[in-house]
Each structure stands twice: as structure tokens, then as C-alpha cells.
Image (cartoon, rainbow, N blue to C red):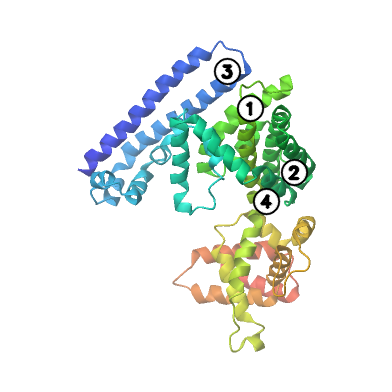
Amino acid sequence: KNFVHLMCTVIDDLRSIDKRLSEYRERYEFLKNDRSNAAEFKRRKIQYFCDINKNARSEILDFVTNGIKQYLLDNPFDTLARVEGDDKLAVLFLQRRYKYAFYRSFYDMDYDYGACVKISELHNDAPMNKWMEIEHEYLEIKKTDTEEFKNKLKRIVEEKNIISEILNRVSGNYHLKRREEIFETLSELFRAKKYQSFIALGLIQLEGLFYDYCQIKYGEKENQGTLVEKVDKALKSNEYKYMKFYPYFAFDVPIMRNDVAHKGFVDVKDLEWTAYELVLDLNTVSKMVRSESYDKFIGFSMTHEAMLKWTPEDNDEENGNLSMYRMLIKELFGIRYVIGEHFWELLKCPEKYDEELNFYSQEDLPEGYTDIAGIVIVLSALVRQENFWIAIKETLQQYSNDTTQWDEFIEFAKKMRNDYIADLDEDAKTHCIELGKLISG
């Protein structure tokens, strides 16, 4: 029964892809002789969706050839009954068969990607499990009553004073601070309802925010390229966000962006609504940039919160708080999959980030509180202490022996050894060298 249900689903997926590809070819043919800027980006958009649908078809056929047996063994329950019973968790589990099943909407060129961008950062105060439901509600409103959708978003922009939120976000971020004067001007233009000027300047800043995103992620020496290339680089590390945001920023926004570059203004019927849309776009992208710039600090905050719960053991006074270092190692090991390389670089060389850390340092903190700069300095100093390396050795010896190897911890210990062995003081280096012998032995 599950096999029959699965094959019906697979055939339905393949048919939907073939139908799309046929339709997209017709659209491309219709536009092939149009030499306008808009038509060029529409052709690129069609080509993008043809490519990802072809890739999806290949993935599905590979699943039919190689994946069906394991899928059926992994799902011994009645799959049709679960789907008909609207068992959302089971449906989510079943969709893992291939990417198309999970991201089906994002293979449709007519999906409202622009609306998704605008509303994606408007419901962060709701529980995370409600985000998709809220987003769906917005999209349904737009389908049934476009004016109500516009009015709803305009009210949110006004009531939440989003233009001020964006300005505060820019002013309070080390990487965005240099745009403060420009965003002050943008805020004034929007409030004065000088929408043509706001849009012309705002579109340039939208691209600038993607420039900042790439600079944070890849470094100043990276060639950022065109707006489309910046968007690709900024989003490609997150598959879900890429498929959801890329089509809008890569194919829709550049049409207006190029109008500004070539004409000096945008030619749209509803300047006011376009300005409100741009406010929401700037809101989403500025939040993305801020999040990326703070990413390296997340591990420090998580570790600091955990370390606040440490209590000394009976013999800690004699052994130099060895239990504290064991706890630190456990926390660093535990967060290794949720932090990026910038965390480890900051942990090892905080002096490289002096200017940024000073930007976020706070004066007159209440007693017992530490700012992020202080947390970084303390944790960076702790990993260079002799007892930190003694604790790693002990942990490795405790959980790895001739018959049992804890491979994940060995890899962690190896990374730490390789990162620090050349920079440690004499006593700590001795234990780091011994750690290397344990790993290789």
C-alpha cells in the first residue's frame, strides 16, 4: 500500500515538473526578441526555474532508481492514512524523500517571493512554530485582497516605526555604522513622503547591504561582483533562505535597480506602495546583515551563560579550578556545530577585532554584568591557560582508550591542538604537545 501511495506521489511530482517546464519554455519563447532590461531579467528568471526543475526531476528519478526500498523500510506506518489525517509531523518526515518534496513551492516561478521577503521579519515575536502559518496567512490575504494586504503592511510599517528601527539597527552595528548618515537621509525622505528620492537612494543602499553581508562573511579582499552575485554569495550557505529569497533579489529587484542606474528614477504607478515595499526589504536585509555580523559572538554568549552555572568542586582550590576548565571544554565541544570559523578566529586572536569589540563595549555596567568584549577577553585568556590543556588531556583519556575511540572529541582536540600549539606559553605548550602524542598514539 505504501509503495502504491509513494509511486502516485512521485508521478504527480514528475508531472508537475514537466508541466512547468513546458509552460516556462513558452514564456521564454514569447520574450526571446524583447531587448528591454526587464525582459532580460525575466529570461534569466525563467532559465533559473527551468534549471532547478530539471535538477529536481533528475533527483526524483535517482530516488526511483535507488531510494525506494530504504524509504519503504523507514516508513512502516500507513503513509496515506497519515497524509489524509493531516498529521503534519509525519508529512514533514515523509517529505525528506527528496528536496523537491520539501521545497515544492520554491520551484514555482509564480510563487510570491517578494512578499515572502517583506513579511519574513515581521513576526519574529511569535512562537517559531507559528511562523510558517503566519506567513501563509499573509500570502492568502494578498491572493484574495491585494489592497487589504497593502494596507496591512503599511499599518505595520507605521505602527512599528520600522524606518526608525532600521536606522537604529544601522547606527548600533559596527559594520553598518558607516551608512548611518545615508539612512538618516532615507528616514527623512520617507517621512517627508519624497518617495521617488527615497526609492532611488534606498535601492542603492539595498545593494550596499548585500555588499556588507559579503564583506562580513568572506572578508574585504573578496570581489563582491554585481548585485546578483552579491545576493548569491550572501544566501548560498542557507539552502532554505536561498530558494526563498534569491529569485526576488536576483531577478525582480535588479529591474528597478537598473532603472535608477540608467534613468535616474523609477517609473512605477504607485510610488507610495513601492516605497513601503522598499522599507520592508531594507528591514529584512539589514536584519540579515546584523545577524551575520553578530554570528561570531553567539558562541561566546552561549558559553558565558553556561559557565555562570559553574560551582567549584571540593579540591578546586588546590588544582587551579580544573573543574571549570573541564566545563569550558564541554561547552566549546557542544557548540562546535552551531558556530562558524569566525568564532574560532575571534577566540584565538581577539586583538584582530579590537576596533569592533571596542564599538560594542559598554561603560557603567551594573555590578556582576559583563559586555561581549569582556566575555571574549576572558574566554580567550582561559583557553591559553595550562589547566585548559590538562583538562583536554584528561577528557580525551577518560573517553578514549585502546578499544573505544570517541572520534568527535578526538577531532575537536586535534583542531584545538593545531590552532594553538604555536602560540602557547611554555607550560601550556608542554601539555598541548602531550595532547598531540595522545591523539597520534
The amino acid type, in three-letter code, at marker 4 is: Ser
- Sequence-wise, the earlier of marks 2 and 3 is 3
How far apart are the two marked residues, 2 and 1, measured between alpha carbons?
24 Å
Q: Position of residue 231 (x, y in %)?
A: 62, 36
Query: Is disc 2 in contact with disc 1, using a CB cutoff of under 8 Å?
Result: no
Q: Quadrant of the C terminus?
A: bottom right
Instruction: From the image, state whether disc 2 or disc 1 is nearer to you.
Output: 1
The residue tagged 3 is 39
Query: Is disc 3 in contact with disc 1, using a CB cutoff of under 8 Å?
Result: no
- Sequence-wise, the earlier of marks 4 and 3 is 3
Q: Is residue 298 left or right of residue 168?
A: left
The residue tagged 4 is 293
Q: Pointer 2: residues within 10 angstroms few (<14), some, or many (20+)?
A: few
**Element type at marker 2?**
loop
Identify the residue at horizontal 37%, vertical 47% (top origin).
92
- Does residue 66 show up? yes
- Sequence-wise, the earlier of marks 2 and 1 is 2
The amino acid type, in three-letter code, at marker 2 is: Glu
Badge number at residue 254:
1
How far apart are the two marked residues, 4 and 1, measured between alpha carbons?
25 Å
The residue tagged 2 is 220
Q: Position of residue 319 (x, y in %)?
A: 65, 85
Q: Nearer the viewer, residue 224 or 243?
A: 243
